Image (cartoon, grey):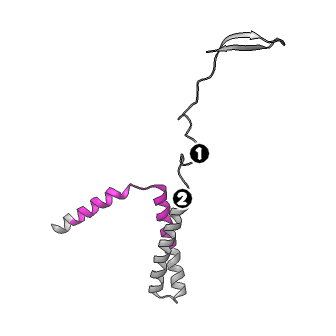
Amino acid sequence: MKRTLALLAALAVGLSVSACETPQQQNALFGGALGAGTGALIGSAASGGSAGGALAGAAIGAGTGALLGSAATPPGPGYYGGPPPGYYGGPPPRRCAQWAYDYNGNRVCTAFY
């Protein structure tokens, strides 16, 4: 019974945080996985095929890959620059209330509303 409750509690905790991901977290996870694989290969080759070298390389590679993957994430939209389109449209267009003609015969507006 205790084992079932512990398993259900672990499952509930795992499900509660499984869908909360941002692009930065996704890139950190991908970078960590790629770094762990690369680090394990390099660590195994550098230590002559020992498991300890592969584990050390995987740990170092996972940490480095996660840091680089997280840092390489571009900022989301709206971080820099002006407001998004439609946020502020500016003043309404000026409309002419009275038309007249200048010396050259061109129609010009003399009063706005």
In the image, what residue occupies the spot 39% across and 55% down? 20
Instruction: Locate residue 27, reporting x and y percent.
Output: 50, 61
Disc 2 residue type?
Thr
93 over 21 or under it: above or below: above
Q: Nearer the viewer, residue 65 or 109?
A: 109
Whole-number angstrom distance, CA of label 1 to CA of label 2: 18 Å
Query: What label sits on residue 73 in the rendered view?
Result: 2
Q: Earlier in the sequence, mark 1 or mark 2?
A: 2
In the image, what residue occupies the spot 22% across and 66% down? 6
Q: Nearer the viewer, mark 1 or mark 2?
A: 1
* Disc 1 + disc 2, Cβ < 8 Å: no
Q: What main secondary structure does the magenta stretch of the protein show?
A: helix
User: Any magenta on residue 24?
Assistant: yes
In the image, what residue occupies the spot 49% across and 56% down? 23
Instruction: Locate residue 102, reporting x and y percent.
Output: 80, 12
24 over 42 or under it: above or below: above
Q: Nearer the viewer, residue 52 or 80?
A: 80
Residue sitting farthest toward the left: 1
Local secondary structure at mark 1: loop
Query: What label sits on residue 96 in the rendered view?
Result: none
Region in magenta: 6-35
Local secondary structure at mark 2: loop
